[in-house]
Image (tube, rainbow, N blue to C red):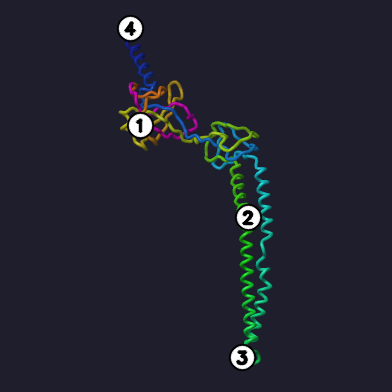
Amino acid sequence: MKYITSLSLWIAVSLLLFSCSKNGAEFDASGTFESVETIISAETAGRLDSFAIEEGQLLQADQLVGFIDTTQLSLKKRQLQAQIDALLTRRPEMAVQIASLTEQIKSATRERHRVERLMRADAATQKQFDDATSNVEVLTRQLDALRSNLRTTTSGLESETQPLVSQILQIDDQLIKSRIVSPMNGTVLTSYAEQYEMTGPGKPLFKMADISTMILRAYVTGDQFSQITIGQKMKVYVDKGAKDYTTYDGTVTWVSSKAEFTPKTIQTKDERANLVYAIKISVPNDGKIKIGMYGEVRF
């Protein structure tokens, strides 16, 4: 009878110790899992002609998930391009314009050479040679003036087209921004819009996060703080049932330099500690860790 009583006492004590261990006494710190959440917003105004987003959906970086109506932008771009084309049709054809004068200069130059040869043979006068030379010079000045005028006209037309070209570039930028693209690999957490709704610049469309790696924000006491270093490896435990934990390898990526009051939902190794330090532990996610879940840490 005495043996049975002792055995019962031993079992009771063992269960009590196990219960205390399960409740966190065996762990050095605890916290909740979080991730870097990104809100994707519209960059231009219009109707959501396409928006294929579902919560929980996995997205790849640069994946097209929708687009905003671009009808007005396309029409405006076509109008601007027509204005540019109309201006450019007034651009003078320099080669055609100067062709006649160029031929006249060549002919006048040949005539001067002919007169020069005749003058050497005393078959032409100095005045004839001077007249031929003057004719070449006059035609050359006319050609230079024509070229200058043509360049001025062309430059003026190009200056008129520049504002139109800038407007087209702005429209091209808006057309690009009308495409709704995932900026990274991640999971859709929340959708804020539906297809065919009107949207505008800055209006949130959906929220996503890369949950392939989770961050456990845990809290340590001042006594533990000196033991923590960035890059330190730790064991992270996630409750998977009444009597068991899933164990993960974690790495400290950030340590707060300021103490804060202990959050009400967090247990620390020293429950009397009023001030704690936050740390972030990076944990590879096998798909079972969810945002907001509790995690325990052992140094």
Do labels 3 and 2 touch, CB within 8 Å? Answer: no
Residue drawn at 40 percent across, 24 percent down: 263
Q: For marks 4 and 2, give the CA distance.
A: 107 Å
Residue occupied by mark 2: 161
Q: Earlier in the sequence, mark 4 or mark 3?
A: 4
Instruction: Specify the quadrant of the image occupied by residue 153.
Output: bottom right
| Residue extent of the magenta highlight | 272-298
Do labels 4 and 1 touch, CB within 8 Å? Answer: no
Q: Earlier in the sequence, mark 4 or mark 2?
A: 4
- 65, 137: nearer the viewer: 137
Residue drawn at 65 percent across, 89 percent down: 124
* For residue 96, above or below residue 52: below
Q: For marks 4 and 1, give the CA distance.
A: 59 Å
Q: Quick check: 182 left or right of 24?
A: right
- 220, 47: nearer the viewer: 47
Do labels 4 and 3 touch, CB within 8 Å? Answer: no
Residue occupied by mark 3: 120
Q: For marks 2 and 1, give the CA distance.
A: 59 Å
Q: Quick check: 140 left or right of 295?
A: right
Crowd band around label 3 with a 10 angstrom C-alpha radius: few (<14), some (14–19), many (20+)? few
Position in image of residue 78 (x %, y %): 68, 49
**Residue 216 colored in magenta in the image:** no
As shown in the figure, which amino acid type bears the numbered disc 4?
Answer: Met
Position in image of residue 204 (x %, y %): 56, 34
Q: Earlier in the sequence, mark 3 or mark 2?
A: 3
Q: Earlier in the sequence, mark 2 or mark 1?
A: 2
As shown in the figure, which amino acid type bears the numbered disc 2?
Answer: Thr
As shown in the figure, which amino acid type bears the numbered disc 1?
Answer: Lys
